[in-house]
Image: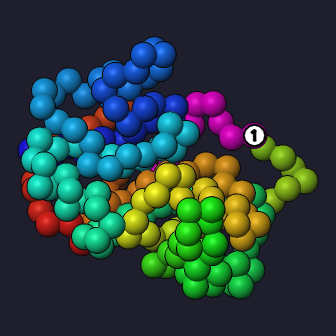
Amino acid sequence: MLILLNKPFRVLSQFRDRDGRPTLADFVDVPGVYPAGRLDFDSEGLLLLTDDGRQQARISQPRSGTRKTYWAQVEGVPPPAQLDELVSGVKLKDGPARAVSARQIEAPAALWERDPPIRYRASVPDSWLEIVLTEGRNRQVRRMTAAVGLPTLRLIRYAIGEWTVDGLAPGEWRKATARRSS
């Protein structure tokens, strides 16, 4: 079984929390499923849950090459050199990291409101980037955009392999057919 969940902002990618924060259990009441990878507490978007350990590993292990597409709202408007730097590679404390692709996009049309909304500053422009990775280190997109001078204001995982968050409001989920992700 494979479940696609649109994980809301400020929800943990686990089923229990000693501190009482919102978890996946607040949204998914399906026994025996576990997240295939993680999504930070402060990030939103697609999270896959499965009851198949092999599928979980195939989706979440960097060596599998599964592409993960992120939409990042960043502070500033990047010149091409900053986007090129994300693809050629940046140095992070835990080693080099690079995106498969990085490009500026228009604000996603089907984007839901975030609660609470990001802080708006009239004097500081912002823009949206689409960043594709095949690995998913802790807070990697946020650290990469910061390394090139584009702090992330909002981060949404739009896709994992072939699966997208299309049609799912925050907190909604649906069962998917188990396809091999790429």
The residue that disc 1 covers is 119
How has the structure been colored for display? rainbow
The image shows residue 128, relative to residue 90, as above or below, that is: above
Spot occupied by residue 64 in the image (x, y as percentages of width and height):
25, 70
Q: Work out whether residue 67 can be spotted.
A: yes
User: Is 84 displayed left or right of 34 in the figure?
Assistant: right
Residue drawn 45% across and 70% down? 132
The image shows residue 62, relative to residue 121, as above or below, that is: below
| In the foreground, 157 or 34 | 34
Give the overall secondary structure of the magenta segment.
loop
Q: Work out whether residue 126 can be spotted.
A: no
| In the foreground, 8 or 58 | 58
In reply to whether residue 96 is colored magenta, the answer given is: no
Q: Which residues are drawn in magenta?
A: 110-119
Residue 51: quarter of image: top left
**What is the total number of numbered labels drawn onto the structure image?**
1
Residue drawn 66% across and 55% down? 152
At mark 1, the secondary structure is loop
